[in-house]
Image: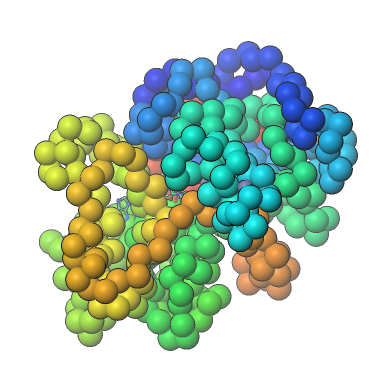
Amino acid sequence: MKAMTYRGPYRIRVEEKDIPRIEHPGDAIVRVTLAAICGSDLHLYHGLMPDTRVGMTFGHEFIGVVQEVGPDVRNLKVGDRVMVPFNIYCGTCWFCARGLYSNCHNVNPNATAVGGIYGYSHTCGGYDGGQAEFVRVPLADVGPQVIPDDIDETDALLMTDALSTGYFGAQLGDIVAGDTVVVLGAGPVGLFAAKSAWLMGAGRVIVIDQLEYRLAKAREFAHAETLNFAEYDDIVVELKKQTDYLGADVVIDAVGAEADGNLIQQVTATKLKMQGGSPVALNWAIDGVRKGGTVSVLGAYGPIFSAVKFGDAMNKGLTLRMNQAPVKRQWPRLFEHIRAGYLKPSDIVTHRIPLDDIAEGYHLFSAKLDGCIKAVVVP
Ligand code: NAD
Ligand code: ZN
Ligand code: ZN
């Protein structure tokens, strides 16, 4: 089969690989019909995540058709169209029992924090991902769900991560009616977080980025006010001005480790360390939220960042909430919102790319070229 493979930072290509086989009785093999490239894939692409091995296939956002099931699989059958959450989890451990699927204790037990994630380095279990013609889905009775007939395939694809994550980020913000919610980052995750903030009763939603085409999308898709941080000497000062000098009630970080492909080439890991290793967006969040406010961190921070302003966060009495999203927990509500017409997730898709051209897709999405917001990969 054809599969995207990692060759080193900024180098990927499509290679022939063996079609994955059932390795455990609970596995399924899924023929991928749609996959997507995520901002999280960019951290791998940029070489920022530890133990990302040459030859690995990325891709934790995918849907497909069940091709084969192991003898223990009860909930799926060959031919089912399935959406697969990015988390791989057991469904029964202490964490899974509490809906904390992203922290599953049984899958990937050697990691201290994160559970299993498709195509996301050996730190997250070393599973190959779905940017390929086929993918092995472990614990297939637990995560995947048959796509309801009335749900569009691209919408289902976006629910396997970006939409569920944005919604989760807004939930972590504990938004109460009338809150001013600031979202840092107008990528797919930030756009969905901004949209979700309204669904939870926000009174004002402000999206901050430096890419004008993405801010335009934030105005159109998420009906948000926008601020371009490149236009201000100090975006936090501007944010304070706009919020009666109090700061926002909630700030959602949808940026993480330098997500901008152009910047990362200039700002090397060493340089970041010399600057104290301070993650820009997270510190803007801590500075820009009001006292007693909530910072919700969705952005993934690799190990190169160390000096987070935790002293300030403590002194400000902040609630810092963060996690990898437990994707499937959000699905019942998201189906309702989509069916009610409150949400059309696929409106953010800008590119559809054949698997053969996936390297071009990574380049456009990483360097933010050609108006790229979300690229869907078609095997
Ligand atoms: P993306 O790269 O498309 O978007 C990031 C955006 O942030 C870009 O538009 C960029 O211009 C902007 N940006 C860069 N620096 C900024 C700053 N200082 N302030 C404001 N904006 C800034 O990525 P995405 O797909 O939207 O993902 C966003 C983040 O969410 C990534 O870090 C990704 O790893 C993370 N993520 C987390 C989860 C989770 O479960 N918690 C799931 C998916 C993605
Ligand atoms: Zn993702
Ligand atoms: Zn578990």
Image location (x, y in percent) of residue 248: 31, 76
Nearest the camera: 342 or 293? 293
Tell whether 102 sits left or right of 372. Answer: right
Tell whether 273 sits left or right of 170. Answer: left
Image location (x, y in percent) of residue 295: 35, 66
Nearest the camera: 73 or 110? 110
Q: Going 36% across and 52% down the picture, which residue do you hit?
A: 255
**62 vs 7: above or below:** below
Q: Going 39% across and 47% down the picture, which residue do you hit?
A: 300
Image location (x, y in percent) of residue 173: 43, 70
Q: Going 35% across and 65% down the picture, which residue do you hit?
A: 320
In the displayed image of the protein, which residue is found farthest to the front? 94
Image location (x, y in percent) of residue 82: 76, 44
Colouring style: rainbow
Tell whether 179 sits left or right of 341. Answer: left
Which of the 4 image quadrants contains residue 294?
A: bottom left
**5 vs 97: above or below:** above
Tell me, yes or no, if residue 372 can be seen here: no
Tell whether 186 sits left or right of 128. Answer: left
> Could you tell me which quadrant the N terminus lies in?
top right
Which of the 4 image quadrants contains residue 352?
A: top right
Q: Going 40% across and 82% down the picture, which residue do you hit?
A: 179
Give the tally of numbered discs: 0
> Could you tell me which quadrant the C terminus lies in?
top right
Tell me, yes or no, if residue 42 can be seen here: yes
